[in-house]
Image (cartoon, coloured by chain):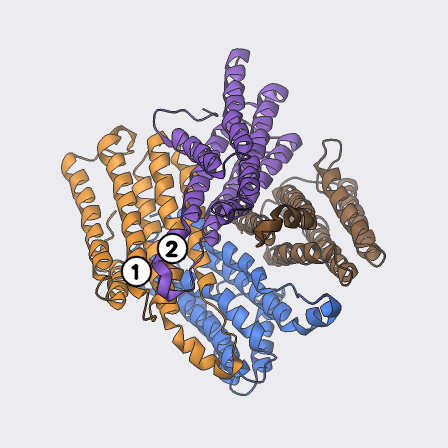
Chain colours: A brown, B blue, C orange, D purple
Amino acid sequence: MSTSRLESFSDGVIAVAITLLVLNIAVPHQPLQLAHDLGHQWPTYAAYATSFITIGIIWINHHVVIGRLARTDHSILMLNLVLLMTIGVIPFGTALFAQYLNETHGSHLAAGIYAGILLLMSVAFATLNWQILFRKPHLLGADLDLTQRRKIQARFMTGLVPYVVATGVAVASAYATLAICATVAVFYALPIASTPAS
Amino acid sequence: MSTSRLESFSDGVIAVAITLLVLNIAVPHQPLQLAHDLGHQWPTYAAYATSFITIGIIWINHHVVIGRLARTDHSILMLNLVLLMTIGVIPFGTALFAQYLNETHGSHLAAGIYAGILLLMSVAFATLNWQILFRKPHLLGADLDLTQRRKIQARFMTGLVPYVVATGVAVASAYATLAICATVAVFYALPIASTPAS
Amino acid sequence: MSTSRLESFSDGVIAVAITLLVLNIAVPHQPLQLAHDLGHQWPTYAAYATSFITIGIIWINHHVVIGRLARTDHSILMLNLVLLMTIGVIPFGTALFAQYLNETHGSHLAAGIYAGILLLMSVAFATLNWQILFRKPHLLGADLDLTQRRKIQARFMTGLVPYVVATGVAVASAYATLAICATVAVFYALPIASTPAS
Amino acid sequence: MSTSRLESFSDGVIAVAITLLVLNIAVPHQPLQLAHDLGHQWPTYAAYATSFITIGIIWINHHVVIGRLARTDHSILMLNLVLLMTIGVIPFGTALFAQYLNETHGSHLAAGIYAGILLLMSVAFATLNWQILFRKPHLLGADLDLTQRRKIQARFMTGLVPYVVATGVAVASAYATLAICATVAVFYALPIASTPAS
């Protein structure tokens, strides 16, 4: 199978997931305290921005990873589907995280689930990349020597670390989890950083 | 009509349907029992994963089936539209199934409707494939002899069987219905299995 | 501007609108009367199927109409945007119609609004087609003589009639409105009929 | 990176955002006063039409701006992502504005936020355009002399003015904000006007 329809389907799923994030931002119902309520739900905006940039970076990386392929096979389609499934869950994790960040109870669990979903997504992505580079190198469009492939995969593995930390730190502070996830998003967005896939 | 816009429109509908599934996963509202409530809604996660993989496999099969065509006609566009309509209903069936799986009343009916929707989808898909292979073979891009066409169609008919069973078994146990549908999804996802369309 | 991105954007909007229709099908909340409640909301299913097929036929026609163009201009982009806006409202009209069809009060108004939205959509589509065929014939990919163009436009104008009737008949019976709209959808879906645009 | 997948992803996000706007139009629940309730929510329709046309014009401009590029780089992808993020928030701003326009309290704030989101979007768009024309001219597909580039950028800067006014005027009247935003949308939609990007 050629990669073009795989790309267009993945683009579609990622575009819908990233745009559905806005449904988590609720319109407050009390006119007399609109300003207060809008301010009070700042975790929703922070989670929206963090997840939006994160999914956007996933999309850029996905383009790079799939762009290396000349064609795909069943195993790549399926690992890609698992990756899309974890991306598809991000709007739920974002909603959960945003709703519980300021709560006395539940914030640690919600933060752990949010970072855990991003970690799962990163693991699915690293697995897809590993399958392509090390199990199916004959499907690549251009030859990559072992050193190059190891370097690319190492960057993916490094990309897992902050999400492991963000998931673990949720036990101590949900705000720390948010800070780490937001920092990762901003870091990859800055011109100085290179994304895991490039 | 060429098949490329048919593919891109179908990709769009399938991508939206698969991503809308996440809207079925509700954020619990009781902070004091968040862990309990998140655990209690496990049928939602099971139904999400089952439907996500199932729709993903439909998408792969759809690519194979439409990829055989050099061009389309009105009958194929319409049978494809009916297929998309059954795919579009899957998020509703998934929500219904997930909400009633653990209920004392309604679980059998909900399970039957869920499996019934997947069965309807499979029938629509088998009909579309049959129309292409046996009624419109002149629209195919490459010649397929009768033996090959019969073999492909036979695999589609075989693919109906588990959904017939899953629908029937709903009378006895909604969990059995879920087990069968999830097994079908995992089976086609594994590298050993070939999808009905290939 | 080339027509390819116009097509892909329009495909996207139409694919999202057609798939959002499923959000109108609610999961009943009373386990003890699930079968009754699911049966009671049959207008939702009828409206879903009618709107799904109708939007699907719009998509096919849209492909034919835009496919005649070699390139587009500002006026075509804007008339296309107005068409997409009326298509985008169909999920609301469908929800309104489905919820009020069986009500003692409001059903006539809801039916009139539903058919009125479809009528508006048809008027927007006929206007777009008229703009292309009679005001911007130099943008067409192939020459069409005046007789051919008049014939195509006449079919679009004929396509308005059932929706005028369906809107008017809503004063008498919401069920008649549904019957007409559903009949139009089935009529164009059948192999014997040719769609307005072809 | 080539621009084609950037365009298709952006098209997807914009198509989803524009179609999600319809979810803001609620189906009233009181059959006895359906006509009154439908009439009473006219701000919803006005906001829907304004935002739909506005996003549609963003899409057209986006096509023109990206169409000038032969290829993209990381900075353009990221500024484009920020633009998409502001577009993704428009459905929320529209819902907020529509719900509070007729309220005694909160209407000024809601109007200011709505116009502020459109202003942010315009600033993000002008920044993306500036980055392309003045920081990355070597990525352009065709040479544009400095005069041409300044003229294009000046039109983008002029496009900010009405949104600055609409945001500021929200302190006095939410209706004035709506009037300005709707006028901008209609102005760019009319054949006499040229969009900022062209």
| Quadrant of the image occupied by residue C100 | bottom left
Secondary structure type for disc 2: helix
Asked if residue B3 can be seen in this view, the reply is no
| Quadrant of the image occupied by residue D122 | top right
Distance Cα–Cα, label 1 vs label 2: 10 Å
Q: Nearer the viewer, residue A118 or C181?
A: C181
- Residue found farthest to the bottom: B172
- Residue found farthest to the left: C147
* Percent position of residue A178, x then y: 76, 49
Instruction: Categorize mark 1 by other alpha carbons within 10 Å: few (<14), some (14-19), many (20+).
Output: many
Specify whether D145 is left or right of A108. Answer: left
Tell me whether circle 1 and circle 2 mark residues in contact (CB < 8 Å): yes
The chain letter for the residue carrying disc 2 is D
What residue is at 28 percent from the left and 53 percent from the top? Answer: C116
Specify whether D125 is left or right of B11. Answer: right
* Percent position of residue B144, x then y: 40, 60
Residue type beneath disc 1: Leu
What residue is at 54 percent from the left and 69 percent from the top? Answer: B95
* Percent position of residue C64, x then y: 30, 45
Asked if residue D4 can be seen in this view, the reply is yes
Q: Is residue A112 above or below residue D117?
A: below
Residue type beneath disc 2: Leu
The chain letter for the residue carrying disc 1 is C
Instruction: Categorize mark 2 by other alpha carbons within 10 Å: few (<14), some (14-19), many (20+).
Output: some
Secondary structure type for disc 1: helix
For disc 1, the marked residue is: C109
Q: Nearer the viewer, residue B108 or C115?
A: C115
Q: Is residue B170 above or below residue D157?
A: below
Q: Nearer the viewer, residue A52 or A47?
A: A47
For disc 2, the marked residue is: D38
- Tell me, for residue A117, which label it has, or none: none
